Image (cartoon, rainbow, N blue to C red):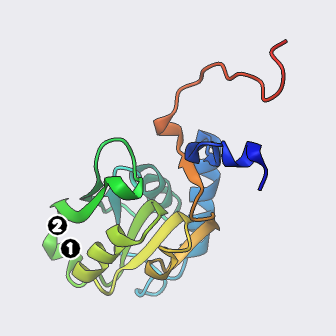
């Protein structure tokens, strides 16, 4: 590792996702899930893990013509991100409709990313028969996911389009 690599901040090993990319990857997730539901290939409902799972869940629901969409709100980070020293025990703030959910059979639970897997572990404990799908997955969380599109290293920080604004960036070399 060079001195330049050692001086990089953790967020500088970033994977920047555009709106176009999250749309393409969410559609790819839908295609991978198409026909895989337990009811002659159909899914009963989509449940988005808020907040990151809402955009991918909407796209998956649209692509697979699933009209029943709900949310589960889980909090597992303090404000400021997900550094290890900022994590806390995950807890559910809002649950989806209990009658619809049952044990999770026929339900697609969608999130943008699985990182440590703690959020999905909590939700899976409540709905053990649900199918868990994420657009992106890190190695520590992969065991909690049934389907995902893109794997990234554990130390990569993913910048989602809803977390960014366009701004000027200094060139890597030189100032002219």
| Residue identifier under label 2 | 97
x, y percentage for residue 168? 65, 19
Residue reaching furthest to the front: 3
- Give the image quarter of residue 125: bottom left
Left or right: where 48 falls relative to 135: left
Tell whether label 1 touches label 2 (CB within 8 Å).
yes
The residue under the point 31% across, 63% down is 68
Element type where label 2 sits in the image:
loop
Q: Is residue 7 above or below residue 37?
A: above
Residue at image position (83%, 26%) is 173
Horizontal relation, residue 66 to residue 140: left or right: left
Residue 33 image label = none
Q: Quadrant of residue 100?
A: bottom left
Which residue does the image show at 57% across and 66% down from the upper left? 29
**Residue annotated with mark 1:** 100
* Depth check, front residue: 106 or 111: 111
Name the element at disc 1: helix
Instruction: Residue at 68%, 48% (x, y): give it.
Output: 6
């Amino acid at each position: 590792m060079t001195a330049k690599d050692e001086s990089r901040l953790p967020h500088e090993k970033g994977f920047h996702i555009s709106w176009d990319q999250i749309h393409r990857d969410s559609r790819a997730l839908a295609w991978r899930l198409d026909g895989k539901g337990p009811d002659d290939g159909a899914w009963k409902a989509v449940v988005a893990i808020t907040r990151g799972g809402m955009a991918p869940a909407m796209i998956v629901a649209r692509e697979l013509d699933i009209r029943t969409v709900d949310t589960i709100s889980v909090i597992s980070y303090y404000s400021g991100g997900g550094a290890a020293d900022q994590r806390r025990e995950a807890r559910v703030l809002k649950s989806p409709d209990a009658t619809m959910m049952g044990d999770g059979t026929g339900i697609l639970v969608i999130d943008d990313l699985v990182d440590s897997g703690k959020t999905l572990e909590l939700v899976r404990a409540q709905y053990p028969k649900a199918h868990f799908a994420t657009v992106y997955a890190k190695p520590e969380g992969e065991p909690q996911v049934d389907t995902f599109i893109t794997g990234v290293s554990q130390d990569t920080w993913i910048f989602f389009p809803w977390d960014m604004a366009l701004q000027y960036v200094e060139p890597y070399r030189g100032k002219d």
